[in-house]
Image (cartoon, rainbow, N blue to C red):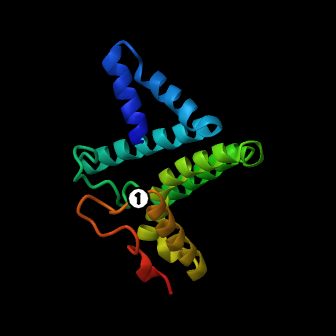
Amino acid sequence: FQEMRYFVESQILWDTSKNYNDLVNEFMAHFYKDASAEIREYYDFTRMRYEQASLINDQSYCDDIYSNIGDRTIWTEGTVETIDKIFKRAYQKIEHYKNEDPEMYEKLFNRIKELELTNIYSKLKFYAANYTQSEKNALVDEFNYYAVKFDINRVSEFGGATVGYFDDIKK
C-alpha cells in the first residue's frame, strides 16, 4: 500500500483537517476502481490481524523495516483462506474490464496481484503441505513470475532473493 501511503501523507501535509479514513477510501476508489471495497476489506482485515497479534504476543509488528511481519500467529490458515476469498471477489469485480477496457483490466489486475503476492507467500511458507504437488508447483511459478514482473527482489530486508525462494517446494 505504498502508493496509498504517499497519497494520504501528501494530502494531510497540505490540509491536516482531512480525515484519514476518507482519504483511504478516496485512494481506493481511484486506484482499485470497482474492486475498491474488497481491497479496503483486505487492508482493514490485515491491519486487524496485526493489531490482534500485537496484543496476543505483546510486541509490535510494524515498528520498523526489520519487524517480523509474517508468522503463523498473524497468517493463520483461516486468515489466508479469508484473504484468498477477498481477492477472488476483487478479481470478479474487475472482470467486466476484460472486454470493455483491456488496458484498464490489466492495470487493475496487476495492482491486485501485487497485493496478493503476500498471501501466495503465506500459502507456500506456512501451508504448502495442504496443497497437491501440482498446486504447489503452480503457486511457486506464479510467485516467481509476478515477483519478476513487479521487480520484487527480496522476501525481506535482509532475506533471500524472491525468485527461486520456494523452488525447493517444486518437484
Estimate the x, y position of residue 36 in percent, counting from the top left. Answer: 58, 36
Determine the image quadrant of residue 12: top left
Estimate the x, y position of residue 38 in percent, counting from the top left. Answer: 59, 41
Q: Residue at x 77, y 47 (%)?
A: 99
Q: Is residue 5 left or right of residue 119?
A: left
Label 1 residue SS: loop
Using the image as rendered, state which of residue 39 and residue 129 is in the foreground.
Answer: 39
Give above or below for 24 relative to 54. above
Which residue is disc 1 drawn over?
151
Q: How many marks?
A: 1
Q: Is residue 139 left or right of residue 151?
A: right
The quarter of the image holding the N terminus is top left
Using the image as rendered, state which of residue 166 and residue 52 is in the foreground.
Answer: 166
* Neighbourhood count class around disc 1 (C-alpha, 10 Å): few under 14, some 14–19, many 20 upward: few
Using the image as rendered, state which of residue 171 and residue 154 is in the foreground.
Answer: 154
Mark 1 belongs to which amino acid? Asp
Residue at the far front: name it. Answer: 103
Estimate the x, y position of residue 77 in percent, counting from the top left. Answer: 49, 61
Using the image as rendered, state which of residue 36 and residue 86 is in the foreground.
Answer: 36
Q: Residue at x 54, y 54 (%)?
A: 113
